[in-house]
Amino acid sequence: HGQSHEAVSQPTPAGSATSSASQPWSTYLVDNSRLLADTLGLAFRRSRRLDDHDVHVGAVPWGTCIRGVDVGEDWLRVGNLYLPMVVQCVPVLIPRAAGDLYLDIHAANGPRAGIE
């Protein structure tokens, strides 16, 4: 007379359920090797518009890695701000494996990398 326990459902602990709203964070290299912009980095935007620069936060230096959430339409959300993944039809955020964080200022800024 063994009773079956299959019908007993265990409550799911809070936070363990995967929600479609909690998208995974990914790591990206901020890459200027193809765009060749004469800037120090990729500027944050306050919205998903290229001309909506956040002048208070500034930019992510070229050649560094950043983590964010891909929100589609070539935009990466970092906290409350956004970074374009493509500028002038050129990819500027290149996916990197998790943990592949490094800093390559020379490759990022080319000959202007010298510090006075």
Image: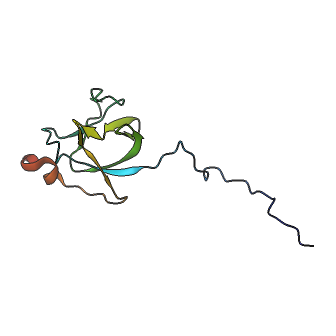
Residue lying at the far right in this picture: please name it.
Answer: 1
Residue lying at the far bottom in this picture: please name it.
Answer: 1
Residue lying at the far top in this picture: please name it.
Answer: 51
Image quadrant assignment for residue 6? bottom right
Placement of 4 over or under 24, stated as above or below: below
* Residue 71 image offset from top left, x and y in percent: 42, 39
Residue appearing at x 6%, y 49% in the figure: 111
Q: Which of 80 and 96 is in front in this view?
A: 96
* Residue 16 image offset from top left, x and y in percent: 61, 53
Q: In screen coordinates, is 17 left or right of 110?
A: right
Q: In screen coordinates, is 90 left or right of 100?
A: left
Q: Which of 67 and 20 is in front in this view?
A: 20
Placement of 62 over or under 2, stated as above or below: above
* Residue 30 image offset from top left, x and y in percent: 25, 47
Placement of 10 over or under 87, stated as above or below: below
The answer to whether residue 114 is seen in the rendering is no
Placement of 80 over or under 96, stated as above or below: above
Figure colour scheme = rainbow
Q: In which quarter of the image is the N terminus?
A: bottom right
Residue appearing at x 34%, y 39% in the figure: 74
* Residue 10 image offset from top left, x and y in percent: 74, 57
The answer to whether residue 46 is seen in the rendering is yes
Residue appearing at x 36%, y 31% in the figure: 48
Total label count? Answer: 0
Q: Which of 58 and 11 is in front in this view?
A: 11
Q: In screen coordinates, is 98 left or right of 112?
A: right
